[in-house]
Image: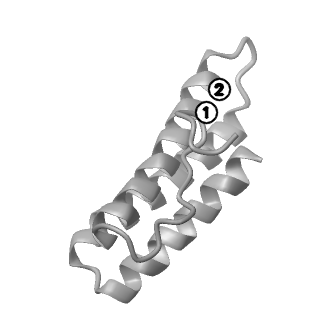
Amino acid sequence: MTGTPHEPDFTGLEGEGDEAQQAADAVRAVLNWYTARIVAGRRAPVPDEEQIAQWTADREATFADLDRLPHADPAERSRLAELYAARLRELES
């Protein structure tokens, strides 16, 4: 089910509300996904260090995009919003 706390639903947001906020929300949702996986991975009886390292690198790259958002032009904000909404759907599938 989309739109639950576990799976935010970004469909139908195009053209509504503040585009910068929509982009930030999409990026933060992906950050939250990575954070949850990193924590769970570290708590596993036998942590998969390689997978944790990949999630950590992906999370750092996501943070970099979040830091860029305030200075991004509308086209870049739109691109990031779409990219991270799609990434979240992919991660959660």
Q: Is residue 74 above or below residue 27?
A: below
Q: CA distance from mark 1 to mark 2?
A: 6 Å
Category of crowding for the residue at label 1, using alpha-carbon neighbours closer than 10 angstroms: few (below 14), some (14–19), many (at least 20) = some
- Res 27 quadrant in image: bottom left
**Is the C-beta separation of discs 1 and 2 under 8 Å?**
yes
Q: Is residue 92 above or below residue 22?
A: above
> SS of the residue at dot 1?
helix
Q: Is residue 65 above or below residue 73?
A: above
Horizontal side of 49 relative to 25 (left or right) equals right
Of discs 1 and 2, which sits in the foreground? 1
Q: Which mark is residue 11?
A: none
Category of crowding for the residue at label 2, using alpha-carbon neighbours closer than 10 angstroms: few (below 14), some (14–19), many (at least 20) = some
> SS of the residue at dot 2?
helix
Q: Which mark is residue 41?
A: 2
- Residue 8, x across and y down, in percent: 54, 46
Residue at image position (55%, 42%) is: 34
Horizontal side of 47 relative to 78 (left or right) equals right
- Res 21 quadrant in image: bottom left
Q: Please name the residue that numbered disc 1 is placed on.
A: 37
Front residue of 22/76: it is: 22
In the orientation shown, which residue stands out farthest toward the left?
A: 71
Horizontal side of 41 relative to 63 (left or right) equals right
- Residue 5, x across and y down, in percent: 52, 33
Residue at image position (65%, 26%) is: 41
Quarter that holds the N terminus: top right
- Residue 44, x across and y down, in percent: 69, 16
Horizontal side of 16 relative to 7 (left or right) equals left
- Mark 1: amino acid: Arg
Q: Is residue 61 above or below residue 28?
A: below
Front residue of 46/6: it is: 6
Residue at image position (48%, 47%) is: 29
- Mark 2: amino acid: Gly
